[in-house]
Amino acid sequence: QVQLVESGGGLVQPGGSLKLSCVAPGHTFSGYRMGWFRRAPGKAREFVASVRPSGGATYYADSVKGRFTISRDNAKNTVDLRMNALKPEDTAVYYCAADVAYGWDYWGQGTQVTVSS
């Protein structure tokens, strides 16, 4: 069982920035693909970004490309999502996920991001 814990959400004005972090207390996820997803009110959960185990290859949803950056520090066992130029439509609960064996097997509880003036 892999427990994932997100942090860093909050309220930010349009155009602002936030950094989300994900940790796995007591567990090493350096060998796993890691990702961020989000669920906006009334919408289905959607993919935001992912990073390969080595950290060398990253993937983004078109809606966040150029504004969000996913990164990982395997030594510290963290995965971050840096979000810039935030828009009201980025408002959602953001989830960290780990691809351990069969796709996105493990999920965090989520952290709320609200973009509003």
Image (cartoon, rainbow, N blue to C red):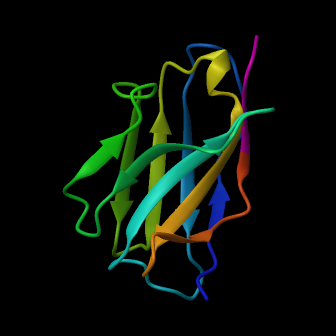
Q: Is residue 56 found left or right of 82 in the rendered image?
A: left
Q: Nearer the viewer, residue 81 or 35?
A: 35
Q: Nearer the viewer, residue 110 or 45?
A: 45
The part of the chain drawn in magenta is 112-117
- Residue at coordinates 23% horizontally, 68% vertically from top-left? 54
Residue 5, horizontal then vertical, whole percent: 65, 67
Q: Quadrant of residue 7?
A: bottom right
Q: Nearer the viewer, residue 41 or 109?
A: 41
Q: Is residue 36 found left or right of 90 in the rendered image?
A: left
Q: Is residue 53 found left or right of 95 in the rendered image?
A: left
Q: Is residue 55 above or below residue 99?
A: above
- Furthest-right residue in view? 42
- Residue at coordinates 19% horizontally, 57% vertically from top-left? 56
Residue 43, horizontal then vertical, whole percent: 73, 34
Residue 47, horizontal then vertical, whole percent: 50, 44
- The image shows a total of numbered marks equal to 0
Q: Quadrant of residue 96?
A: bottom right
